[in-house]
Structure formats: C-alpha cells, structure tokens
Image (cartoon, rainbow, N blue to C red):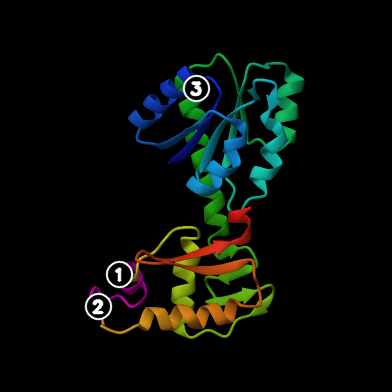
Amino acid sequence: MNILLADDEKPLLKFLLRGLRAEGHDCTIINELEEVLPGIKQNRPQIVVLDRLFGSEDSLNIVAAIKALPSPPMVLMLTALDEVSERVKGLQEGADDYLCKPFDFDELLARITALGRLLGRENETQQSTLRCGGLEMLLEERIARLNGEEMQLTKIEYELLLYLAHNVGKVLSRERILSRVWQTQRDPSTNIVDVYISRLRRKLDSDPGITIQTLRGAGYRLGLESDNS
C-alpha cells in the first residue's frame, strides 16, 4: 500500500518508515505541514498518516482540502490530544480514523490494514464508474461523458482515454500505450499514438480543467487542473 507519513517528530517518522516498509508498504515521509497537500498530489497515497499538531499548527485545518482532492486518500490522524471531544472533532472534520500517542506499532499496523480493507470495498462499489474531474467513464456501458455530455468515441479512443484516466497524473510511454491499447509490443513505425492523442485532445477541449500533457521523450499524462493548484 502507498502511504504518506506526515509528522514533525523526525525520530518517529524514521521509526514508522522502517517499520511500515518492513511490512511491505511503499512510504513517503513529510515533516512540514505546508508540504502535506503537495506531497499527496505528487505521490497519490492511498493512506495518509497525519500528525494532528505541527508545532502550533493544527493539521485538522487541511483535512477538508485533502478530502476534496480527486481520489482522496484515507486519513489516519495521530495525536497527543486524547480527549474524547478532540477525537470526535477529528472524525467530524473528515479523518477516517484517530490514534492517540503514544501508540503501539501493532495497533497502528492493524488500523492501516483496516483502512486498506475499507478502501478496497469503496473501490469495488465505485468500479462501475471512473471519474476524473469533469470526465466520467461508465465502465460497463463503455460510455464516456464530459461534464454530463456523452462523448463520441471510437473503440480505440475509448480504450486510450480509459487507460489515461486509470493512470491520471502518471506519465505513460508510447510503448506502454501501444502494449495496453493496441496490444502490441512492436513499434508500428508510425505516429499512431500521437494521432489518437490529438483526437482526444480535441474532444476534451471544452473542459480546460482536463489536459493530456506531452512530456518530450517520456510520453503522455492526463492532468487535472487541481493537480497544479
């Protein structure tokens, strides 16, 4: 599981990093509150383990912004504020779980596992629809809508847009696109990928918040306006 650890206690961060990596999790650490939102946008974690207090700053103030992101992560809040009222406040503000310091590592691990199961169930219930900003893809019907209007797509255009949407924010090389969408590992010695990317760009043009970016020498990436905010 992809986990972002955010805490201003560097020794604790290092301990959690070692422990969670030993359990097979992919972890990133952040020790400044102002870096949390950019770190989530960049790393797209499934779970954020977030310290409640960064000095005098209360991370509860950014939970709503975290939850407003596309495909928001689960938030497990850590805190030394163990009063019931504070735990309730944290959950009411959008945290998915709340663990008081000091805590046992096994309990933290169990709570992360539980959030992972919950996340899996949410993904299962949402798997018939994929949303990226104003783009909505109905997977069973194989229909794409842009801001409520059905897009007129060929089979290949739909498959290409779906692949980009499944990997929003990630750079996909031409080779990966050819392998997935055209199901070939051979270079066709044409600009077929570029042609279909251009077609999709024209069909997405009515929504400036959704772009297909070209990264020279690397490939293509579906980007949302909120990713750059």
Q: Secondary structure under badge 3? A: helix
Q: Position of residue 141 (x, y in %)?
A: 55, 76
Q: Secondary structure under badge 2? A: loop
Which residue lies under the disc numbered 1?
A: 175
Closer to us: 85 or 58: 58
Q: Which residue lies furthest to the top in this view?
A: 102
Q: Is 132 positioned to the left or the right of 161 in the image?
A: right
Which one is in front in this view, the residue at disc 3 or the one at disc 1?
Answer: 1
Question: How many marks overall?
Answer: 3
Residue type pointed to by label 1: Glu
Which residue lies under the disc numbered 2?
A: 187
Q: Where is residue 132 in the image (x, y as percent from the top left)?
A: 59, 63
Which residue lies under the disc numbered 3?
A: 107
Please name the residue shown 26% across and 82% down the image: 188
Does 181 lie within the magenta span? yes
Please name the residue shown 45% across and 21% down the image: 106
Question: Do the residues bearing badges 2 and 1 touch, measured as CB atoms within 8 Å?
Answer: yes
Residue type pointed to by label 2: Asp
Residue type pointed to by label 3: Glu
Above or below, 162 relative to 225: below
